Image (tube, rainbow, N blue to C red):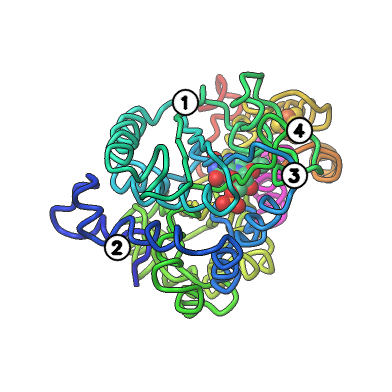
Amino acid sequence: MKVIFKNIEKEGYTGNIEDYVAAEGYQSLKKVVTMGPEEIISELKTSKLVGRGGAAFPTGLKWEFTKKSQGSPKYVVCNADEGEPGTFKDRQILEKDPHLLLEGMIICGFTIKAETGFIYIRGEYKHAYEVLEKAIKQAEEKNFLGNNILGSDFSFKIKLYRGAGAYVCGEETALLDSLEGKKGQSRVKPPFPTFVGLNNSPTVLNNVETFANISEIISKGGKSFSQIGSADYPGTKLYCLSGDINKPGVYELPMNITLGELIENYGGGVKGKLKAVLPGGVSSSLLTDKDLDVTMDYSSVQKAGSMLGSGAVIVINQERCMVDIAKRCSEFFDYESCGKCTPCREGTKRTQEILNNFANGKGELSSLELLKELQEVMYDTSRCGLGQAALNVVRSAQEKFPDEFEEHITQQKCKLNVCLMNKGGNV
Ligand SMILES: Cc1cc2nc3c(=O)[nH]c(=O)nc-3n(C[C@H](O)[C@H](O)[C@H](O)COP(=O)(O)O)c2cc1C
Ligand code: SF4
C-alpha cells in the first residue's frame, strides 16, 4: 500500500503538474473548498495521522489548535530542513512529487484560514528548491494557488526560504526564528507555534511527509486511512535505510513492520554481521540484534529504549568500534549546538573531549561516570531536543558495549583497529 510514493513509483511519472493532475492530484483540494474546516479536522483526527518529523504529534489536533487560536494572520510552514544524519526521505517528495506537498499545504491554509505558507528548505537541496519553484508557478497558473482558488473566496500563496545549513534550524522554533531573519536558535516552549509561531502568530508547522499524507486522507476519508497498517499508528512511513546494509534507500511501508523485516526483506540484509542499529538517526539510542522483533512505530521503538524520530535507520556492523561511533556522533552535536544554553553548549564540548581521549588512549575510568552525569544533566536541562538527545548514542553505547570502552581506557587498545589510539591521533 503506497500513500506517499503512489505516483513516484509509476513508470514515466515526472512530478509535473500535468502528471499530478492526471493521477487525480488536486481533487482533494477541489473537495475541501466545498467542506467546512471542522469537517476537514474531523477527517484528520479520524485518520489518526501523527507528524512524521519526529515528535509524532497528532496532526488533526495541531491544525485544530491553530485554527481555534486567537491572532492573525495565521501561517502554514513546512519543515523541509531534513537535517538529521541518515534522513533523506523528504527529498524524494520535494524532487519527485512536489505537488503532493503543495496540495497538503494549501488544504491546511484553507482549514486554518491562512493566506501565506512557507517552505523552509535546507540550503543543500538546490535541485529540490528549483523543482519547487517551478511547481509553485505551475500551481499558480492553474489557480490551485493565488487569489480566489478554484473560484472560492480562499486565497493562498506559498513562498520558499532556503536554510543555511544548521541542524538546529530543523527544530520548529529555531526554524521560525531563522525564517524571521534572526539567528536560528530555539525558543522556550511553551508557548508552542500553534499559539505563538511565525511573527508571533498562530502557525501550523509540519514536516514534508506529514503534508504529503493529507491529500490521501481527504480523498479516501480518515477512516480508510486509519485502516492502513498499524492500529495505533496508521498509514505508512518512509524509512531511510543506510549504513552497513546491502540495499540502502527509502522504503515506504506500513508501520506494523518489524526492524528485522525491514533490514532483511527490504534492505537486503546486513553487510557483514549486525552489531547495532540506530532506528532514528544519531539522536536516537542504539538497538541491537535482541531488538529485531521491535515494531517500527513510535511507541514500540520508545518502549525498546530508543526513538523512531524521522525514520533514519542506520545499520552498524561488527567491524565498527562503538567508541569511535560515539565520538563521531558527539563531534556532530558539538559542532551543531547553537550555544544558547549552557548544558548543551558546554556538555557537548566536554563529551567530545572525553571521547577523543578514549580514542587516543588517554582516557580515565572515572570519565565513564562523568559521561553518564553529563547525559542526565543535558537531558534534564537543555533547552531543546538537540541537547536533550545529544548523548543518546554515547549513553547507549556505554550501556550496551561497556567492554569496548573499558578496553580503550585500561588497555589503550581498540581491538577493531579503528581508533589509532596513541599512535599519532585518530581517524
Ligand atoms: C534538533 C532538532 C532537529 C529537527 N529537525 C527536523 C527536521 O529536519 N525536519 C522536521 O520535519 N522536523 C525536525 N525536527 C522536529 C520539529 O521540531 C517538529 O517537531 C516537526 O517539524 C513538526 O512537524 P510534524 O508534526 O509534521 O512532525 C527537529 C527537532 C529537533 C529537536
Ligand atoms: S539545547 Fe543546544 S541547540 Fe538547543 S538551545 Fe540549547 S544550546 Fe541551542
Residue 43: x %, y % from top left: 54, 70
- Which residue occupies 74% across, 39% down? 196
Query: Is the residue marked by circle 3 packed among few (<14), some (14-19), or many (20+) residues within 10 Å?
Result: many
| Image quarter hosting the N terminus | bottom left
Task: Kindly report the distance in space between the C-alpha atoms of the residues bearing marks 2 and 3.
Answer: 34 Å
Q: Using residue 372 as the reference point, say whether residue 159 is left or right of it.
A: left
Identify the amino acid type marked 4: Arg
Residue bearing the label numbered 2: 6
Say above or below: 184 vs 255: above
| Mark positioned earlier in the residue sequence (2 or 1) | 2
Identify the amino acid type marked 3: Phe
Residue range (magenta): 387-415
Say above or below: 174 vs 294: above
Query: Is the residue marked by circle 2 packed among few (<14), some (14-19), or many (20+) residues within 10 Å?
Result: few
Instruction: Give the SS element for disc 1.
Output: strand
Instruction: Give the SS element for disc 3.
Output: loop
Instruction: Give the SS element for disc 2.
Output: loop
Task: Kindly report the distance in space between the C-alpha atoms of the residues bearing marks 3 and 1.
Answer: 24 Å
94 falls in the magenta region: no
**Residue 187 circle label:** 4
Query: Is the residue marked by circle 1 packed among few (<14), some (14-19), or many (20+) residues within 10 Å?
Result: some
Residue 283 shows in this picture? no
Residue bearing the label numbered 1: 162
Residue bearing the label numbered 3: 195
Task: Kindly report the distance in space between the C-alpha atoms of the residues bearing marks 4 and 1.
Answer: 20 Å
Identify the amino acid type marked 2: Lys
